[in-house]
Amino acid sequence: MKNAESLLQRLAASGCSGSPGHPLLMGILNLTPDSFSDGSLYHRKGRLDPEAVLDQAERMVAEGAGILDLGAESTRPGAEAVPPEEEARRLLPCLSLLARRGPACWISIDTRRAALAEEALGEGACLINDVSAARDDAAMLPLMARSDCLAVLMHRQGADSKSMQQAPAYTNVVAEVSAFLEERATAFVAEGGEEGRLLLDPGIGFGKTLEHNLRLLAGLGQLAPGRRLLLGASRKRFIDALHPAPVTQRLGGSLAALQAGLAAGVSVIRVHDVQASAQYLRVARAIAGSPP
């Protein structure tokens, strides 16, 4: 697996919010049986199969993913929290296998729990992706700040995944999400974290209505100017609301959101469909006259 310093070097070419760049694709590896999109994909006879995870990791990297994001707790709307020991039981064997036999890539850990994140960093992960913006676990922000990893802090309205879609409301969603992300970035730096190691995520689908999601996608360039953004809109429910389709048939809508991220200078785009996303980015950049 690649280390955090090499990821920082790669992100230097990815651009920042507000200007088109060269985003890095993050392939999604959900190790849960109940994820909204690929839950149970890597389970055999009711049990998680690390070899199946390794196969998918190799496929995604071959298709163009630079980062793989491993998550072992579903954060879909309405999801129940997973006990810490169960989250670790799912994630750590897969991470260990990827460290020993996996493809050359950067590994991100999608977790809200500092203890698991710290153990994962010891196994070779170099990025912590926290959907709670380090608010669910008081130990998370200090861990992010003192380690040499990269950190993703995401906006989520609502106390947790179970309640976040219960009547979300904003006066100005772009301004409010931007202010939240700036506050969390300031808190990260105040803890001693290096600003360059931080990515901010507007949290598409996390405590937002269809209109909120669309306004955020249209306003990505106004969020956290000068900072790096991560966008995760792949296959999400807002696509179905606009053009009804089963979750695995939302590629077109996912690519439309990807284009919004590309135009706004998003640094990392989190996707399920790596091959199609990589092809889209290459062609879009070529049309714009940029190196593929």
Image (cartoon, grey):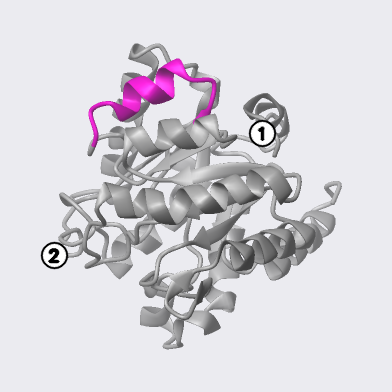
Q: Amino acid at mark 2?
A: Gln
Q: Is residue 5 above or below residue 20?
A: above
Q: What range of the chain is rendered magenta?
A: 137-150
Q: Looking at the picture, how far across and down is residue 149, in whole percent?
A: 53, 27
| Residue bearing mark 1 | 11
Q: Residues within 10 Å of mark 2 (few under 14, many from 20)?
A: some
- SS label for mark 2: loop
Residue at the spot of label 2: 166
Q: Is residue 27 above or below residue 188?
A: below
Vertical position of residue 242 compared to residue 214: above or below: below
Q: Residue at point 23% right, 57% down?
A: 81
Q: Crowding near pointer 1: few (<14 within 10 Å), some, many (20+)?
A: many
User: Mark number for residue 3?
Assistant: none
Q: Residue at x 72, y 67 (%)?
A: 275
Front residue of this view, candidates 122 and 161 = 122
Residue 186 in sight from this viewpoint? yes
Question: How far apart in space, not on screen, are marks 1 and 2 (Cα)?
Answer: 36 Å
Residue 226 appears in view: no
Residue 231, position as x, y percentages in the image: 50, 51
Tell whether position 185 is magenta: no
Badge 1 marks a residue whose secondary structure is helix
| Quarter of the image where one finds residue 36 | bottom left
Nearer the observer, 227 or 39: 39
Residue at x-position 76% and y-position 63%: 63
Which quarter of the picture shows residue 104? top right
Q: Is residue 53 left or right of residue 43?
A: right
Q: Amino acid at mark 1?
A: Leu
Relative to residue 62, is residue 186 drawn left or right?
left
Please indicate whether residue 94 sits to the left or right of residue 287 in the image: left
The quadrant in which the N terminus is found is top right
Could you say where residue 191 lies in the image, as x and y percent from the top left? Answer: 34, 14
Q: Earlier in the sequence, mark 1 or mark 2?
A: 1
